[in-house]
């Protein structure tokens, strides 16, 4: 797969699907700006500090990537957290953080990047989840963000189609990442980690391979959504 001449920005690039995507895109020849709060863990051609809950940080990072590469062709919104726990009695500050990270952060990164998407093949890939289509008790706020991501992306795809910018949503199931321990109720996290340890989950690289497939299609092919899950989650 040859992605030479593609200039990419990946958020959430310090771990999990974001980090695997940085690696896969670079191996395919793309120039990659890796962005996250934890810059010591980044491995891009360009490493940028980015807190997606902070609009000024978003504008600074996106503008820096575009300035360094002379524009952008591809944005992968992979920053995300998953609070676990019931709605009743929840710490609502965590709700705000989840909405700001998973939903508003993705929207603002996209907004900041759009004027810089100047190449011939241009893509926005938003990382959702099986949890953007199906729900489980104890993850209501996470589901709200991922259902919201789907709605935003679906409408944006129609808005941008005439301009040639493609918008795709990737919906992974259980993936071995830090997502499940990102925030929230430690007991539920431990229970989920226990379940995940007993089964063969996706690796970040499995999801990155789906992203590479999407962005390497010829311009007349638009992949709306890819749902990908471990076989045991069928
Ligand atoms: C989390 C994956 O399968 O629990 O985004 O919804 S799943």
Image (cartoon, rainbow, N blue to C red):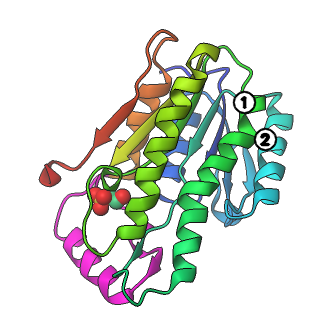
* Residue located beneath label 2 in the image: 65
Q: Residues within 10 Å of mark 1 (few under 14, many from 20)?
A: many
Residue located at (32% from left, 89% from top): 187
Out of 28 and 97, give the one closest to the viewer: 97
Q: How many marks?
A: 2
Q: Is residue 181 magenta?
A: yes
Please say if 178 is above or below 175.
below
Task: Judge from the rendering whether residue 76 lies leftward or rightward of residue 20; answer left or right.
Answer: right
Alpha carbon distance from label 2 to label 1: 8 Å
Asked if labels 1 and 2 touch by Cβ distance under 8 angstroms, the answer is yes
Q: Quick one: which residue is furthest to the top in this view?
A: 220
* Quarter residue 178 falls in: bottom left
Out of 108 and 218, give the one closest to the viewer: 108
Residue located at (34% from left, 80% from top): 189
How far across and how far down the image is residue 87, in percent?
37, 80
Specify start and end residues of the magenta stretch as a single range. Answer: 173-202
Task: Judge from the rendering whether residue 125 lies leftward or rightward of residue 134; answer left or right.
Answer: right
Ligand 1 image-quadrant field: bottom left
Q: Is residue 219 magenta?
A: no
Residue 145 visible, this angle: yes
* Residue located beneath label 1 in the image: 72
In primary-sequence order, the first of circles 2 and 1 is 2
> SS of the residue at dot 2?
helix
Please say if 110 is above or below 47.
above
Q: Is mark 2 within 8 Å of ligand 1?
A: no
How far across and how far down the image is residue 110, in percent?
66, 41
């Amino acid at each position: 797969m040859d992605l030479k001449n593609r200039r990419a920005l990946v958020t959430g690039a310090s771990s999990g699907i974001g980090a695997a995507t940085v690696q896969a895109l670079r191996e395919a020849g793309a120039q990659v700006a890796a962005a996250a709060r934890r810059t010591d863990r980044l491995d891009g051609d360009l490493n940028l500090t980015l807190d997606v809950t902070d609009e000024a940080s978003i504008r600074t990072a996106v503008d820096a990537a575009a300035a360094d590469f002379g524009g952008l062709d591809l944005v992968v919104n992979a920053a995300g957290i998953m609070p676990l726990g019931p709605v009743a009695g929840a710490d609502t500050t965590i709700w705000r953080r989840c909405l700001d990270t998973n939903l508003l952060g993705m929207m603002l990164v996209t907004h900041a990047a759009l004027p810089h998407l100047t190449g011939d093949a241009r893509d926005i890939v938003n990382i959702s989840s099986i949890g953007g289509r199906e729900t489980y008790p104890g993850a209501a706020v996470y589901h709200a963000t991922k259902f919201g991501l789907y709605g935003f992306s679906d409408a944006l795809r129609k808005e941008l189609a005439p301009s040639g910018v493609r918008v795709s949503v990737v919906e992974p199931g259980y993936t071995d990442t830090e997502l499940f321990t990102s925030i929230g109720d430690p007991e539920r996290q431990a229970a989920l980690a226990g379940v995940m340890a007993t089964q063969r989950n996706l690796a970040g690289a499995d999801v990155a391979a789906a992203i590479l497939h999407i962005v390497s299609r010829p311009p007349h092919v638009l992949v709306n959504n890819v749902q990908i899950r471990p076989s045991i989650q069928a």
